[in-house]
Image (spheres, helix red, strand yellow):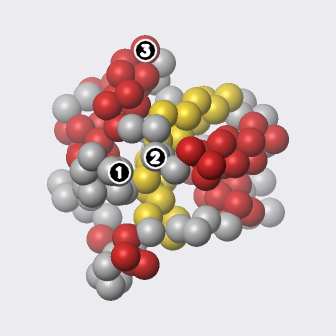
Amino acid sequence: MAYVLIVDDDEDFAHTAAMVLRQEGHDVQIELDTGDASQSMQSKRPDLVVLDVMFPEDASAGFELARSMRHDRENLKGVPILMLTAINTKFPLGFGAKDIDNDWLPVTDFLEKPVDFDLLRQKVAELLGKPDAAN
């Protein structure tokens, strides 16, 4: 069982994703903004972070949290980050895994919103190194 932190301002999505991941046996915490998520990670280091890009207070808050985790927080540098984004539906940027970069976008993988929950299960299993990730 892994400790997964979901950081997303969409409360309905976050609770549904948490339910799906709890069914897989994970301990899941939800934070609805990046400030609370940052504090939460100080208290308990997650094994994986599922992170949205855009938040009401800052359209790039997810990017900033990812950068902070990788560059400013030694204990969080190795935590896999699965970034969720609806940015391509709001802005035609063609944004995706090709944009992963240690400085600008230091995440491990991406999922497009709306999220397919079977794919979410699979990605989480892959990122946690589970042997059944291909199933």
Residue 89 placement: quadrant? bottom left
Residue 35 placement: quadrant? top left
Cα gap from disc 3 to disc 1, whole angstroms: 22 Å
Asked if residue 105 lies left or right of residue 28, the reply is left
Cα gap from disc 1 to disc 2, whole angstroms: 6 Å
* Closer to us: 108 or 34: 34
Q: Earlier in the sequence, mark 2 or mark 3?
A: 2
Q: Amino acid at mark 3?
A: Ser
- Residue 68, above or below 53: above
- Please, what secondary structure does the residue beneath circle 3 have? helix
Q: Are marks 1 and 2 in contact (CB under 8 Å)?
A: yes
Identity of the residue furthest to the top in this view: 43
Task: Tell me the crowding category of disc 1: few under 14, some 14 to 19, or many 20 or more residues within 10 angstroms, Cα based.
Answer: some
Dot in front, 3 or 1: 1
Q: x, y (%) of residue 24?
A: 78, 42
Rendered-image quadrant of the N terminus: top right
Q: Using the rendered image of the protein, determine whether residue 62 is visible from the camera's viewpoint.
A: yes
Q: Which residue is mark 2?
A: 9
- Please, what secondary structure does the residue beneath circle 1 have? loop
Residue 124 marker: none
Q: Amino acid at mark 1?
A: Phe
Total labels drawn: 3
- Residue 18, above or below 103: above
Q: x, y (%) of residue 3?
A: 60, 29
Q: Which residue is mark 3?
A: 43
The residue at the point 70 percent across, 60 percent down is: 117
Q: x, y (%) of residue 7?
A: 47, 42
Dot in front, 2 or 3: 2
Q: Using the rendered image of the protein, determine whether residue 78 is visible from the camera's viewpoint.
A: no
Residue 132 placement: quadrant? bottom right
Residue 55 marker: 1
Q: Amino acid at mark 2?
A: Asp
